Amino acid sequence: MTRISQIVAGLDIGTAKITLIVAERDEKGGLDVIGIGNSPSKGLRKGVVVDMDATVESIKCAAEEAELMSGVSVGRAFVGTSGGHIRGFNSRGVVAITSRDHEITREDIRRVLHAARSVSVPQDREIFHALPQEFIVDDQGGIDRPLGMSGTRLEVNVYLVTGFVAAVQNLVNAVNRAGIEVEAVTLENLAAGQTVLSRDEREMGVGLVDIGGGTTDLAIFERGAIRHVYSLPSGGDHFTNDIAVGLRTPHSEAERIKMKYGCALPSLVPEDETIEVPSVGGRKPRVLSRQLLCEIIRPRADEILGLLREEIKRAGFESSLNAGLVFTGGGCLLDGITEIAEDLFDRPVRRGTPNGIGGLIDVVDSPAHATAVGLVVHGANSRRELKPAPWRQISLGRVTTRIRDWFQDFL
Ligand SMILES: Nc1ncnc2c1ncn2[C@@H]1O[C@H](COP(=O)(O)OP(=O)(O)OP(=O)(O)O)[C@@H](O)[C@H]1O
Ligand SMILES: [Mg+2]
């Protein structure tokens, strides 16, 4: 095996930052991080490309940094997508097992999944994950892996994840223009779940909440699979905007103040603590109470967490979160947010940092890197099973048409 085939790269194109993580498989099959590149994201809004050139430049910057650190040229990467264009819904497929011995083969599983995803979706949407919830062989349900079992009828319940074709294609185009081929486009929470959640949490029921810059993305895992996804159009940037308006300070200062002194829970901050706040328009800086900053932040935290709770209730998963909630994304680094969530949901809440990877772990040991590491881990696991990416790769001179039958999730 050449060195190149052992390299796996995960590219997280976020609204706030773009991260490229390069990992190498070691001899035992483990993964070692060997490089990381971060660059401020300039061309996205709420997870969607709105300025192609700026996005390409940001990807190139992150790639250069990661290549310099790793000493490897990154030719292809697993890319994540999330945000308001993602939708999920349930579907069902049924096939007859016609072989003489009635033993279920990979081909039968392929057929039943094909049947489950043969539903009509709006023209502007594409199914990019078919996540099996359970297989049913004859009348026996609750089966995870039907391969090799015997029966005459195979059914499957799947959760189909769709996204806007244009949104995903623009992401692919941006990556291609930065000189990188897309190996697969993966739902970010699906990828992050592989590195921050334990198997037990995924079995028992857990809510994975990614507080990014522009959006907060929720995925509910139960009995080992994603059962529900949801995206809220508010994220860390909304805290910054509230601070800029509330303290009448420039946006860049509001961001700095949030990161250094921000806290969503006033009771965690000493009452007499003060902070210096730069003013706009050349006026003198002011000294204000840090409690005041907390009071500006708190309502937004209540709003985001309250809306998540409503959605979990609405979708019928309130009693499913036996393992509680796990927070990722840069926005969850805000002090006090997990304490408020614990109180509101009355469930254990923790911040999720990447696991199951070696090498330069210090540089990825943050909830903000959960998606990029997750893309590496998910990508490495799925590489064996991958068919050609269904997205047109524009810069490679090999224009592949999109294939609707694209199953990377299950075999
Ligand atoms: N220490 C910190 N305290 C508070 N907020 C933070 C901290 N570090 C980062 N953030 C916030 O996290 C947000 C960015 O998170 P992240 O990098 O996960 O977003 P993204 O993946 O680029 O965006 P998205 O997922 O929405 O497309 C920003 O709003 C940033 O201000
Ligand atoms: Mg993100």
Image (cartoon, rainbow, N blue to C red):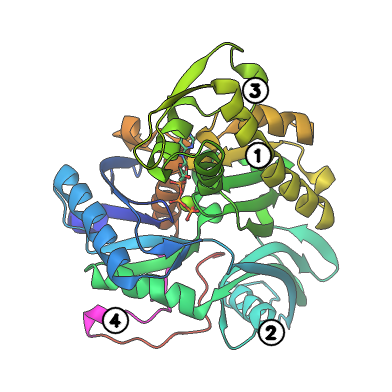
Q: Whole-percent x and y of residue 128?
A: 54, 72
Q: Which three-letter amino acid code belongs to the residue tagged 3? A: Pro
Say which label, 3 or 1, has the lower sequence index: 3
Q: Is residue 153 left or right of residue 406?
A: right
Which residue is depicted at the point 73% across and 59% down?
Answer: 143
- Main SS of the magenta part reads loop
Say which label, 4 or 2, has the lower sequence index: 2
Q: CA distance from mark 3 to mark 4?
A: 51 Å
> Which of the numbered marks, if any, corresponds to residue 394?
4
**Mark 2 or mark 3: which is in front?**
3
Q: CA distance from mark 3 to mark 1?
A: 12 Å
Magenta stretch encompasses residue 235: no
Examine the rendered structure and indicate whether residue 348 appears above or below residue 357: above
In the structure shown, which secondary structural element does the residue marked by tag 2 occupy? loop
Q: Is mark 2 within 8 Å of ligand 1?
A: no
Q: In the rendered image, is residue 27 in sight?
A: no
Which range of residues does the magenta coloring cover?
Answer: 383-397
> Which of the numbered marks, if any, corresponds to residue 119?
2
Q: CA distance from mark 2 to mark 1?
A: 38 Å
Q: Whole-percent x and y of residue 197?
A: 57, 40
Q: Which three-letter amino acid code belongs to the residue tagged 2? A: Val
**Disc 1 target residue:** 301
- Do callouts 3 and 4 mark residues in contact (Cβ within 8 Å)? no
> Which of the numbered marks, if any, corresponds to residue 194?
none
Say which label, 3 or 4, has the lower sequence index: 3
Q: Which three-letter amino acid code belongs to the residue tagged 1? A: Ala
**Disc 3 target residue:** 266
In the structure shown, which secondary structural element does the residue marked by tag 1 occupy? helix
